Amino acid sequence: MSSQSQPDGPRNTNNGSVSKRQARAWQHRAHELGDRLPEGFVVGTATAAFQIEGGARDGGRGESIWDWFTTQPGRILDGSNASVATNHYQRVDEDVTLMSELGADAYRFSFAWPRLQPDGRGRLNQAGIGFYDKLLDGLLAAGISPMATLFHWDTPLALRGGWMNRDTALRFGDYAERVGEVFSDRIASWVTINEPATVTLNGYALGLHAPGDPLLFDALPSAHHQLLGHGLAVQALRSVGVSGEIGITNVHSPVLPYSDRDDDVAVAGLFDALHNRIFADPVLLGRYPTLQPPFDGLARFLDEVDTADLATIAQPLDFYGLNYYMPSRVRASHGRAGGSTATPDGESAAMAALPFSLEPFPEFPVTGFGWPVAPEFLTETLKEMNERYGDVLPPVYITEGGVSFPDEVDVYGDVDDPARIDYLGEHLIAAIDAVRPGGVAEGIDLRGYFVWSLLDNFEWAAGYTQRFGLVHVDFADQKRTPKSSYRWLQQVLAAR
């Protein structure tokens, strides 16, 4: 999944509280929802290469920072790795058939950078090209529109320093050009980078994700270099004449202060900037947000960015990808903002040094990750985007939305997941109603929703402990079992 852009909440394996929402009975209202989908509204599924492909040593694939990260003791909750994952590399035909039988309009996947460019530079690997040729040809034969993400977190390990190194942005621009040249005629939509906020906050600031560096506010160069890489990639794709539309995907979370105290309000503004605005404002407005006192000295690196970089970042886009999973509630704490000393328990030390803490939402049911299930805040997210960016906001796709719940195959070989059905029904309706005439985000041209995820998969630092899929995967034998949520969405799409 793609939205662990803040520390994981408690891993709650009791989703009984979620079942209270089942009074809405979306599992029995598939045709009603199908009727309410606007004409032309795209409904698809989404995955990421590292989480599903496996084949870690097949076809000349290089090593990514996540391959390295999974070898570090204590980094992955269940001690697992993604060397096999869901073995999509070998079972791509089966997975395309699942999408086709679902009736999905589109499929958002990611190219594995180290599969196509094992060393992060130079010509593309022919075996990698062959794999994606097979995937794309299968999708197009099934009438499924491909949305391709160039970077979904699997930085080639050979690029030393990763996104803290400005040269990685230049290498990414070159990679985008080469991929665009090969696949330009078969991809309807291009996403340059997925959730740069998550990469910076979890990977470089808190150390929860690869590369595991607890740099706190010293991680901000990784944010800028990703955005610069995005701008260079847009230029590169357009220079080779790709026919598809081009955008970026950011994760957004509405931020609430814990109370109306001045210090809580101040840190809510800080977290909003760190999670949302630093990653959207430069792309859409051509500038970084200004942090307010007493935190205005924490982002000095961004204050000194060259205006030429900002012009590159603010390339005109054909669409904006928005990932939504949850709101955030922020409370002031007494952390030492700016500290970056690594310790044996660097993860907790980094989090303790922050000037805020993330607080729960006891009024909402929770997911397997302990995240609040709050579709009303998807409405709020769209409202905020409309108010902040107005006419400069291009058409929007919700490029990820989904939920992890514990589920198992029963004695009849079925997986019943009504809570996931309810989640998807509520979030789809929240999105559609927000942008309808008279809705709170009426000005947004919302064009589609991609369900995370098609398959249960390797869930980053949580390993195989969290299941987001419409399709259950037995990780021992790789058997795919469509869940009741898959069958329900199949009915929704057939009813349009």
Image (cartoon, rainbow, N blue to C red):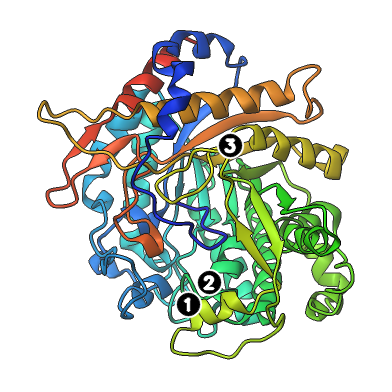
Give the Cα separation between the discs numbered 2 and 1: 6 Å
Q: Residue at x 37, y 56 (%)?
A: 459
Going by the numbered disc 2, the residue's amino acid type is Gly
**Disc on the earlier residue, 1 or 3:** 1
Q: Is residue 468 left or right of residue 273?
A: left
Give yes or no for contact between labels 2 and 1 (Cβ–Cβ under 8 Å): yes
Pointer 2: what residue? 203
Going by the numbered disc 1, the residue's amino acid type is Pro
Pointer 3: what residue? 374
Q: Residue at x 77, y 56 (%)?
A: 283
Above/below status of 15 relative to 78: above
Residue 410 location in percent, x, y? 15, 31
Above/below status of 401 relative to 81: above
Q: Secondary structure at mark 1?
A: loop
Q: Residue at x 72, y 59 (%)?
A: 279
Above/below status of 44 relative to 78: above
Going by the numbered disc 3, the residue's amino acid type is Ala
The image quadrant that residue 439 belongs to is top right
Q: Is residue 384 left or right of residue 111?
A: right
Give the Cα separation between the discs numbered 2 and 3: 26 Å
Discs 2/3, front: 3
Pointer 1: what residue? 211
**Disc on the earlier residue, 2 or 3:** 2
Q: Secondary structure at mark 3?
A: loop
The image quadrant that residue 333 belongs to is bottom right
Q: Nearer the viewer, residue 100 or 204?
A: 204
Residue 377 location in percent, x, y? 66, 37
Q: Callout 3: few (<14), some (14-19), or many (20+) C-alpha neighbours within 10 Å?
A: many
Q: Which mark is residue 228?
A: none
